[in-house]
Image: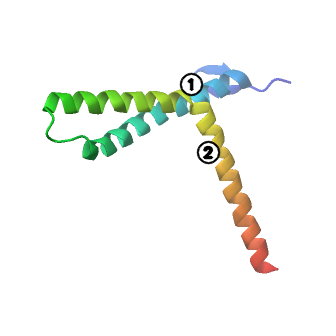
Amino acid sequence: MAQFYKVDNRLLNEEEYNEHCVGLWAVCLFFVTAIYCGYQLHGVIPHEWMKELRFATLIILSVIAGGLAARFAGFIRGACFVGLALMVLYAVGTWVWSIV
């Protein structure tokens, strides 16, 4: 039997729901990466440059970094889940090790 997920006013099958989740990850990763990249680049870009050139460089590089993160959202999502599972496994293992 097929499983359906309710998102807003739509019923999505499993494949559509997975695409929806990856899309949400892509949007969030785009904004987080672009903001973080802009914050880090602000201290690296020379202040001797014209203000417009610094601004354009900062925005263009931040959008490129955010776009790359959004492009690989599926991979990053999977890596986060694997990392979370490994952390839980490590915590359980250390807890069992301390008891024994």
Of labels 2 and 1, the one closer to you: 2
Q: How is the image coloured?
A: rainbow
According to the picture, the residue beneath numbered tag 2 turns out to be 80
Give the x, y percent position of residue 43.
26, 47
* Front position in the image: 65 or 82: 65
Image quarter hosting the N terminus: top right
* Front position in the image: 20 or 4: 20
The residue drawn where x is 57% and y is 32% is 73
Q: Amino acid at mark 2?
A: Cys
The residue drawn where x is 32% and y is 39% is 38
The residue drawn where x is 66% and y is 39% is 78
Give the x, y percent position of residue 86.
70, 55
Q: Earlier in the sequence, mark 2 or mark 1?
A: 1
Circles 2, 1 touching at the beta carbon (< 8 Å): no
* Front position in the image: 71 or 25: 71
Q: Is residue 87 left or right of residue 61?
A: right
What label sits on residue 22 in the rendered view? none
What label sits on residue 8 in the rendered view? 1
**Total numbered labels placed on residues in the image:** 2
The residue drawn where x is 75% and y is 78% is 98
